[in-house]
């Protein structure tokens, strides 16, 4: 999976939004396939026009800190790419770091505010809210 810094660097190299959309679609193709078990109602993200699933795993890093890892999928190519960018920001991070990271600001920095439809923007917010909710739940369990 590409890091968020790699994604930002690649976006800076692409001047046209058609090229950026193709890149986002390519990022979506790098997602780990989601099992049928992970395509459950519990993992389905509400508020998205497309079908979106985000599954989480609570693990421990080498320092013994709780970290959340995510996998996700969608039936829409662009949304799969947005999931890939979201996971590059959040997957493998501590719940505290996830809560502190403003994904919407990162997507705005990449220029998505002007280039996503209102439906896609709402879906993106729903995905971010879901991940942050999972982080708050994990933080409560770890406390």
Image (cartoon, rainbow, N blue to C red):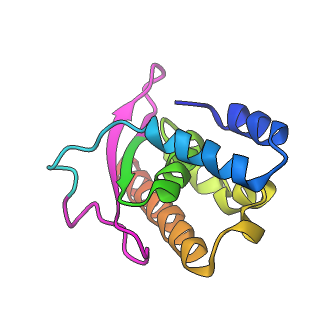
Name the residue rendered at 50%, 71% in the picture: 123
Q: Is residue 74 above or below residue 10?
A: below
Residue sitting farthest toward the top? 62
Residue at (76% x, 42% y) in the render: 11
The magenta stretch spans residue 127: no
Q: Nearer the viewer, residue 12 or 107?
A: 12
Q: Quadrant of residue 102?
A: bottom right
Q: Is residue 30 left or right of residue 106?
A: left
In this rendered view, identify the residue nearer to me: 85 or 27: 27
From the top left corner, tell me how far across and down residue 39 is, in percent: 22, 56
- In this picture, residue 63 sits left or right of residue 38: right
Examine the rendering and report whether any part of residue 131 can be seen.
yes
Furthest-left residue in view?
A: 37
In this orientation, which residue lies closer to the viewer: 72 or 137?
72
Vertical placement of 117 versus 5: above or below?
below
Image: 77 above or below 47: above
Q: Give the residue at x 42% y 39%.
A: 31
In percent of width and height, residue 40 lies at: 19, 60
Q: What residue range appears in magenta? A: 40-68
User: What residue is shown at x 80% (from left), y 51% (from top)?
Assistant: 16
Decide if residue 121 is on the left or right side of residue 43. Answer: right
Residue 142, position in %: x, y? 38, 47
């Amino acid at each position: 999976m590409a890091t968020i810094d790699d994604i930002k660097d690649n976006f800076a190299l692409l001047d046209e939004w058609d090229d950026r959309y193709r890149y986002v679609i390519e990022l979506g193709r790098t997602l780990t396939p989601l099992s049928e078990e992970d395509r459950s109602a519990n993992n389905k993200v509400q508020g998205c026009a497309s079908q979106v699933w985000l599954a989480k795993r609570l693990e421990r890093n080498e320092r013994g800190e709780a970290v959340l890892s995510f996998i996700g999928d969608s039936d829409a190519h662009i949304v799969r790419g947005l999931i890939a960018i979201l996971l590059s920001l959040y997957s493998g991070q501590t719940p505290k770091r996830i809560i502190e990271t403003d994904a919407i600001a990162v997507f705005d920095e990449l220029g998505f505010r002007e280039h996503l439809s209102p439906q896609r923007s709402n879906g993106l917010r729903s995905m971010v809210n879901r991940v942050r909710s999972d982080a708050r739940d994990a933080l409560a369990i770890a406390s």
